[in-house]
Image (tube, rainbow, N blue to C red):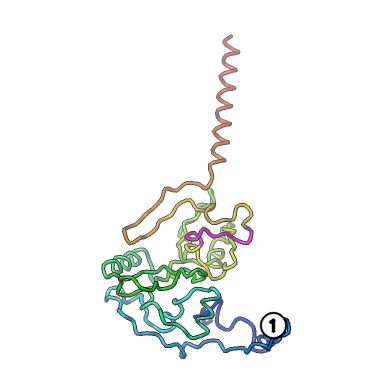
Amino acid sequence: MAERRRKFWGWGYEGEGPTAEQQEKIAALLGARFAIVAPTVQAAPRIEEINLRAPRLAPPTALKPFCSTEPLDRAGHTYGKSFRDVVRAFARDFSNPPDFVAYPRNEAEVTALLDWATAAQVVAIPYGGGSSVVGGVEVPVGGDYRGAISIDLGHLDRVLEIDRSSRAARIQAGVLGPALEDQLRPHGLTLRHFPQSFEVSSLGGWIATRSGGHFATLYTHIDDFVESLRVVTPHGVIESRRLPGSGAGRFVMSVRSAIRRQNRRRRRDTTTG
C-alpha cells in the first residue's frame, strides 16, 4: 500500500477534500449567500508548475544521506497552513523556499546538522507537522546568513519507553498525533491531547507552542503532561529534571504520614501517662 503524501500547498493529504463537483456547489452557495457572481474554482497547484530558486548551498558530504533538494520537499517546507500561506501557494508563489530539507534519523544527526549550520552561518528551522499558522516554519527574509534549511523531524516518531506504573512515556518529538496514539493504545494508555491539527501536528510542536486541545477545559493542555525535556540546541543539549506535573498526591501522602506519626505519639503519651 502506497504511503499517503501530504499536500505541499495546504492542509491534509493528496486525494482528500471536496470533489470538483462539490467545489462548484460550494462556489455557487457562496455566490448566492453574498449576492455576488459565484467564485471561479481554481485548480490546485501542481509541483511541475512551481518555479523554485536554485539552492544557495548544498549539504556537506557527511549530511547528504539524509538531506533532499527535491522540489516537492522544498516546496512542502516553504509554508505553514494559515489562510495567507494557502493563498500564496495557490498563487504559485514559492519565492523563498529552504535551500534543502534534512530528515535526521537520530539525535546525533540533529546535532551534526546544527553544528554545521552554526559554523556555516545557515538558518536552521525545526519542522514537526508543518501545521503552523503564524509563520513558524518560514525562511526569514534578510539577515546575515548564507542560506536556510528545514529540519524535518518526521523520522523521530517513536515511543521509546513506557513506565506503566506512573503512566509516563519517553517519546520522540517528531511523532504525529495518530501515530502517537497508535503506539500508546496497546499499553492501555492515551495522551488525550486532541488539538484541531491533531492528524498533522507533532508532539514537539505541541510542546513548543504550549498547545491546547479541543477538550482543554481542564487537564488537556500539553504543558500539564510534560515531566522532562531533552532538547538539542545550537549551543548543546539541554535536559531538564524529570518532575511530575503536580505534587498534590505526594503532599496528601505527606500529610497522612504526619497525622499517623502524631497519632502514634499521642498513644505513647497516653500509655506512659
Label 1: which secondary element: helix
Residue nearer the viewer, 165 or 51: 51
Image location (x, y in percent) of residue 242: 44, 48
Say if the magenta span includes residue 50. Answer: no
Q: Main secondary structure of the magenta part?
A: loop
Image location (x, y in percent) of residue 61: 27, 76
Image location (x, y in percent) of residue 127: 44, 69
According to the picture, the residue beneath numbered tag 1 turns out to be 30
Image quadrant occupied by the C terminus: top right
**Residue 3 in sight:** no
The image shows residue 116, relative to residue 49, as above or below, that is above
Q: Which residues are magenta?
A: 206-215
Tell me the residue at 57%/31% (across/down).
Answer: 255
The disc labelled 1 sits on which kind of residue?
Answer: Leu
The image shows residue 252, relative to residue 99, as above or below, that is above
The crowd level at tag 1 (other Cα within 10 Å; few <14, some 14-19, many 20+) is some
Residue nearer the viewer, 227 or 179: 227
The image shows residue 124, relative to residue 216, as above or below, that is below
Q: Quadrant of residue 154?
A: bottom left
In-image side of 130 versus 38 (left or right): left
Tell me the residue at 46%/66% (across/down).
Answer: 174
Image location (x, y in percent) of residue 57: 30, 79
Say if the magenta span includes residue 213. Answer: yes
Tell me the residue at 30%/70% (across/down).
Answer: 144
Residue nearer the viewer, 236 or 134: 134
In-image side of 8 versus 124 (left or right): right
Residue nearer the viewer, 1 or 110: 110
